[in-house]
Amino acid sequence: MPDTAYQQTLDYLYSRLPMFSKLGKDAIKADLTNIRKLCAAFGDPQLSFKSIHIAGTNGKGSTSHMLAAILQQNGYKTGLYTSPHILDFTERIRVNGISAHKKWIVSFTERCKEIIEEISPSFFEITVIMAFVYFKEHGVDVAVIETGLGGRLDSTNIITPILSVITNISYDHKDILGNTLTEIAAEKAGIIKPGIQVVIGEQQAETAQVFFEHAFRNKATLFYAESLWDLVRIKQDAKYQYFKAVNRAQQEMYDLKTDLLGTYQRHNIITVLAACNVLTSIGLQLPLDNILKALSNVKQLTGLRGRWEQLQQHPTIIADVGHNEAGVGEVVKQWGLVTAKWKHVVIGFVKDKEITNVLALLPSDNVYYFCNANIPRALPAEQLQEQANAVGLKGMAYPTVKDAVKAALHEMSKEDALLITGSFFIVAEALEAMA
């Protein structure tokens, strides 16, 4: 099938359906009515496979990919649903690391058009039912399902998983999820189901009571990942970072390496190891040697991109999709470990983010290239430049991500380093520009 049919299908979905990337919170349907109708129309496909549900402010994408890699490594036919995509729509839906077939996307959209016209679902709602049907038709054993935003009213929350995972809680989408960590945690805790065990990735004083109460009401056993595993980072090279992993209960230590290079992956790996403990206790076969093998090869197994991804050396170019205060804070810590003659940063945000605190985290001695992605929600580069200048960050504004990357590459020597960050959309357009 020519790619023109696929592109026409994407054009229809992007233009016909409310998209969060274009409209922000106006694209969100604040209930599960539409997704229930969609699931019913396709025979409740979410009931045909086991699932693991992942929520959290940061780290849920990496955590989802690591769990999918481990399941694949252990012989389970594994579905993976994540969002947003970076380079192509099909990345949102994978089976054993292979993106959904374009021909199938076209065919399924045709099957959906009547109900789309009838109930006017959001773009995200359609992608969720698309993933569920794809996983059913491809006979997956287990699907790892990442929430889009929040949890309680997220379209993915129609599933009854075998395990729920909440990575962490920090400030993001305050206009939708709440102004305090307690309020945000309550939305994320909405994925906790009656009798279903739940792993909490990071224990925080502000959120502990929320998770305890939700778990208690649902008679769901709650585990804090940090009480099960500890992880000490030993070193990092160009391809891997290396850890000593300690099973707290057994008091045993293991060598662990991962091809995911951000130092913030320590938290995500602890969460994943704890999740594997729970999954093993309910009958999945996940030998530790296969878990460790999978963690060393996540990118090849699942296709994960944009998480402290080193695009080249001499000069060093790194892309990371950090896009909120906590995420950018972790990126800045890692960026501080990079040695270079001069450091350059291509950066952009969406306009519905509160970025004052984010900008304050960025180093003032870097050279900045402020830009905006080609989406309606993008914060104009000139406005970003003005806000950045106010906190001591210096640099020029560029009308496109491609222009910003081109300018940075022109200015850099082989001893310099470039960081591309601020949002999924900035990283996506930078990767396309450098392809």
Image: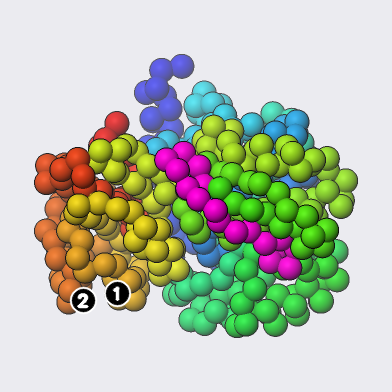
Residue 183 on the magenta segment? no
Instruction: Please tell me which residue is depicted at 64% across the width and 64% down the height of the picture.
Output: 201
| Total count of labels | 2
Instruction: Please tell me which residue is depicted at 45% across the width and 43% down the height of the picture.
Output: 237
Per the rendering, the mark at residue 342 is: none
Colour scheme employed for the rendering of this structure: rainbow
- Residue numbers of the magenta segment: 225-241
Instruction: Please tell me which residue is depicted at 67% across the width and 70% down the height of the picture.
Output: 189
Q: Which element is circle 2 on?
A: loop
Name the one closer to the observer, 156 or 73: 73
Residue marked by disc 2: 391
Residue marked by disc 1: 360
Residue 51, visible in the rendered structure: yes
Residue 157, visible in the rendered structure: no
Name the one closer to the observer, 383 or 419: 419
Name the one closer to the observer, 108 or 214: 214
From what the image shows, is residue 340 above or below residue 171? above
Residue 167 horizontal/vertical position (percent): 61, 62
What is the three-letter code of the residue carrying label 1?
A: Ala
Task: Confirm or deny contact between disc 2 and disc 1 (CB under 8 A).
Answer: yes
Residue 110 horizontal/vertical position (percent): 53, 31
What is the three-letter code of the residue carrying label 2?
A: Val
Residue 171 horizontal/vertical position (percent): 47, 73
Looking at the image, tell me whether mark 2 or mark 1 is earlier in sequence order.
1
How far apart in space, not on screen, are marks 2 and 1 (Cα)? Answer: 6 Å
From what the image shows, is residue 166 above or below residue 209? above
